[in-house]
Amino acid sequence: MNIFKTMILMALLTGLMVALGGAFAGSTGAFIMLLISIGMNFFSYWFSDSIVLKMYDAQEVDEHSAPQIYNLVAKLVKAADLPMPKVYVINSDVPNAFATGRNPDHAAVAVTTGIMNVLDYNEISGVLGHELAHVKHRDILISTIAASMAGVISMIANIAQWGMIFGSNSDDEDNGGGILGTLFTIIIAPIAASLIQLAISRSREYDADKTGGEICGNPLYLASALEKIEHYAQNAQPMQSATPATAHMFIVNPLENAKVTLKSLFSTHPQTSDRIARLREQAHH
């Protein structure tokens, strides 16, 4: 169901771009910025793993430097029928984890030192199962495409805004859809694109939870892990160096705490309580 929902949302993003093109056609500047935006997102896709890992000062480990976590990943990739990813550890007391890389053959899994201190072996296997599910589903590709499309829409909206402020000398017959087309371009389209992108992210989290529960062998392992991580996130300081641009990558939003929470509509993650409820239901079937 979530896969079908993702396809519908991606189709909506595509349709939004087509509609936006109709409202803002004939602009050479928009076309140039479109190419630049796509180029930037392709760069992000190919090099996202190294950029994010450096951002969090993640250190690569192996079976000698971190045998427990490395061997657990090796065990889980066999269950998931995946190639062995690179394994990284981030020096942070905040329990969290994420996966990155452009495809299963070029993937990396990173965990914080905090997650190894807070969770037990089974719970860590649930978290790693979730991250390997993202790799298996190629969610990084999906999220990059969605971000690229949303970025293009926002870029064109910015161009339209400045064009309205300074005026346009274009005489293209197809350029412009009146005041309604301008309002759609500047206000409605970028907001709609952002909401669709966030909805895609939430759908992928549900699917990763389900497959992660299967990979680790017991959905309750992941449910228990999410409960502990969420409790920590709600009652402690947000993860240092975490940014809104990378928050969607983590298993639980690293910027969330008791005082700063995002409404579900504008959140990169589903409500943790809903995720736990689904995992518990999965365990009973």
Image: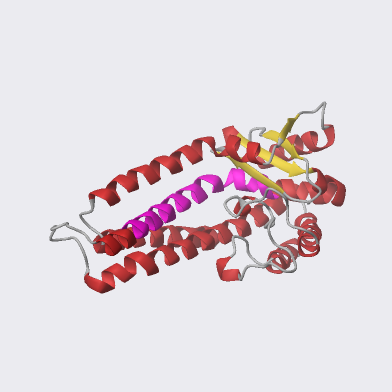
The residue sitting at 63% across, 64% down in the picture is: 270
The residue sitting at 58% across, 61% down in the picture is: 202
The residue sitting at 35% across, 65% down in the picture is: 186
Quadrant in which the N terminus is drawn: bottom right
> In this picture, is 54 found above or below 1?
above
Give the image quarter of residue 203.
Answer: bottom right
Residue 106 versus residue 192: which sits nearer the camera?
Answer: 192
The residue sitting at 40% across, 62% down in the picture is: 12
Residue 51 among magenta residues: no
Q: Main secondary structure of the magenta part?
A: helix
Residue 284 versus residue 61: which sits nearer the camera?
Answer: 61
Q: Where's residue 166, x and y in %?
A: 27, 60
Q: Is any part of residue 215 visible from this angle? A: no
Give the image quarter of residue 283.
Answer: bottom right
Q: How is the image coloured?
A: secondary structure
Quadrant in which the C terminus is drawn: bottom right
Q: Is any part of residue 10 visible from this angle? A: yes
> In this picture, is 55 found above or below 259?
above
Residues shaded magenta: 130-159
Looking at this view, name the residue that lies furthest to the top.
Answer: 64
Residue 260 versus residue 232: which sits nearer the camera?
Answer: 260
Q: Where's residue 216, x and y in %?
A: 75, 48
Looking at this view, name the residue that lies furthest to the front.
Answer: 166
Residue 144 among magenta residues: yes
Residue 280 versus residue 159: which sits nearer the camera?
Answer: 159
Looking at this view, name the residue that lies furthest to the bottom.
Answer: 180
Q: Where's residue 14, x and y in %?
A: 36, 57
